[in-house]
Image (cartoon, rainbow, N blue to C red):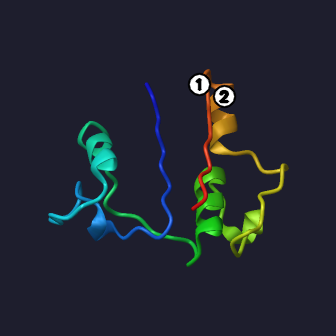
Amino acid sequence: MNIVLICVDALRWDKIGAVSDSKNSLTQNIDKLAKNGSIFMNHITVQNSSAPNQASLFTGLYPVNHRIRENCVSLKEEFKTMAEYLKENGYKTYGVVSGG
């Protein structure tokens, strides 16, 4: 089984064609992935900026535990991530960060 996790900053749900009625969607590639994968429609965020949320997603911890409370702060190596758990269970992992 393959796992592809895409985290996108500053993209509203109603701009993604796969989950909205938007006729002017610019997310054709994400829409193709969604058609053949899973879409999670109900979620919560732990904080109003992306770094704390992504640190929580990858560690399973709240910001009070992983101590990331704002953007531009790196996760300390003491915290084990989802990728490390997956590697331990035979998955090959790869991460890409793209800045805009």
In the displayed structure image, the side of residue 88 where residue 39 appears, left or right: left
Q: Quadrant of the C terminus?
A: bottom right
- Can residue 24 be seen by looking at this rendering? yes
Percent position of residue 62, x then y: 65, 66
Task: State the SS at label 2.
Answer: helix
Give the class, few, some or many, for how many residues have Cα within 10 Å of label 2's Cα (few <14, many ≥20). few
Residue type beneath disc 1: Tyr
- Can residue 38 be seen by looking at this rendering? no
Quadrant location of residue 40?
Answer: bottom left
Q: Nearer the viewer, residue 29 or 18?
A: 29
Residue indicated by mark 1: 91
Residue type beneath disc 2: Lys
Is the residue under label 2 in contact with that under label 1 (CB below 8 Å)? yes
- Residue at image point 77% right, 58% down: 75
Residue indicated by mark 2: 87
In the displayed structure image, the side of residue 77 where residue 62 appears, left or right: left
Q: Nearer the viewer, residue 14 or 81?
A: 14
Percent position of residue 85, x then y: 66, 35
- Residue at image point 66% right, 52% down: 59
- Residue at image point 32% right, 45% down: 29
In the displayed structure, 56 sits above or below 88; it is below
Quadrant location of residue 60?
Answer: bottom right
Q: Quadrant of the N terminus?
A: top left
Task: State the SS at label 1.
Answer: loop
Q: Residue furthest bottom?
A: 48
- Residue at image point 66% right, 28% down: 87
